[in-house]
Image (cartoon, rainbow, N blue to C red):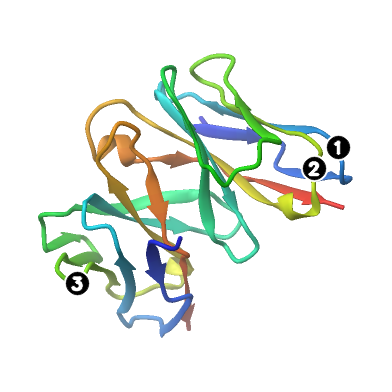
Amino acid sequence: GEDVEQSLFLSVREGDSSVINCTYTDSSSTYLYWYKQEPGAGLQLLTYIFSNMDMKQDQRLTVLLNKKDKHLSLRIADTQTGDSAIYFCAESIAGSARQLTFGSGTQLTVLP
Amino acid sequence: DTAVSQTPKYLVTQMGNDKSIKCEQNLGHDTMYWYKQDSKKFLKIMFSYNNKELIINETVPNRFSPKSPDKAHLNLHINSLELGDSAVYFCASSPRGAAPSTDTQYFGPGTRLTVL
């Protein structure tokens, strides 16, 4: 979406770390999310971070949030071929009808 | 035990036809959504709906209409299909309550619509 931007492609070697970046524009975002879409499937929630946090770690996943710069990143440690997918960041804004605004998605390709 | 299911998975039809895509969730969620994902994988919300409120994205043509026979279903009707309607349509649902649970949307597998 026009409010949430991501780079379109990322390639990494198996075993390396992947870092997927996202920028958003709405400073009133309350939660920021990372979703994963495998080929031919719907989106699956990976993790989320509350806007007053700087970092969240969940096993191989680390989310970093720079609220000042409105920058969100997802780091995947020890990237595996099964991690190949499209990764979407999304923001939600508090309101009467809570909706998600998705970024354009980053296609992660893990090379053997 | 499919949480969010959609039918059909593939839909090929002629321009000008009217078609429907069905969505069902067995999660007991209160809010359901329809998204359109274009060929560049860009995902855009079309509708969000619970039993109190229908939110329509203003960019959605009025040829598209959601219909909810009950809380577990939100079907998408499309009239006078156009070539530009070709895309993958995703249904999703989320529970009632406070964030982030209400933002944790569970997606269906998608319906690939091809308009010839």
Say which element carries label 3.
Answer: loop
Disc 3 residue crowd, few under 14, some 14–19, many 20+, Cα 10 Å? few
Question: On the rendered structure, is B29 left or right of B86?
Answer: left
Q: Residue furthest top?
A: B70
- The residue where tag 1 is placed is B17
* CA gap, disc 3 and disc 2: 42 Å
* CA gap, disc 1 and disc 3: 47 Å
- The residue where tag 2 is placed is B81
Q: Find residue A84 and report its horizontal and vertical position in percent.
A: 47, 69
User: What is the chain letter for disc 3?
Assistant: A
Q: Is residue B74 above or below residue A52?
A: above
At horizontal 42% and vertical 49% (from top left) the residue drawn is A44
Q: Is residue B69 above or below residue A24?
A: above
Q: Find residue B54 and report its horizontal and vertical position in percent.
A: 48, 27
User: What is the chain letter for disc 1?
Assistant: B
Disc 2 residue crowd, few under 14, some 14–19, many 20+, Cα 10 Å? many
Share a chain, discs 1 and 2?
Answer: yes
At horizontal 23% and vertical 67% (from top left) the residue drawn is A70
At horizontal 43% and vertical 76% (from top left) the residue drawn is A7
Q: Is residue A10 above or below residue B27?
A: below
User: What is the chain letter for disc 2?
Assistant: B
Q: Find residue B19 and report its horizontal and vertical position in percent.
A: 78, 33
Mark 1 or mark 2, which has the lower sequence index? 1
* CA gap, disc 1 and disc 2: 5 Å
Q: Amino acid at mark 3?
A: Asp
- The residue where tag 3 is placed is A69
Q: Amino acid at mark 1?
A: Asn
Q: Are marks 1 and 2 in contact (CB under 8 Å)?
A: yes
Give the number of callouts: 3
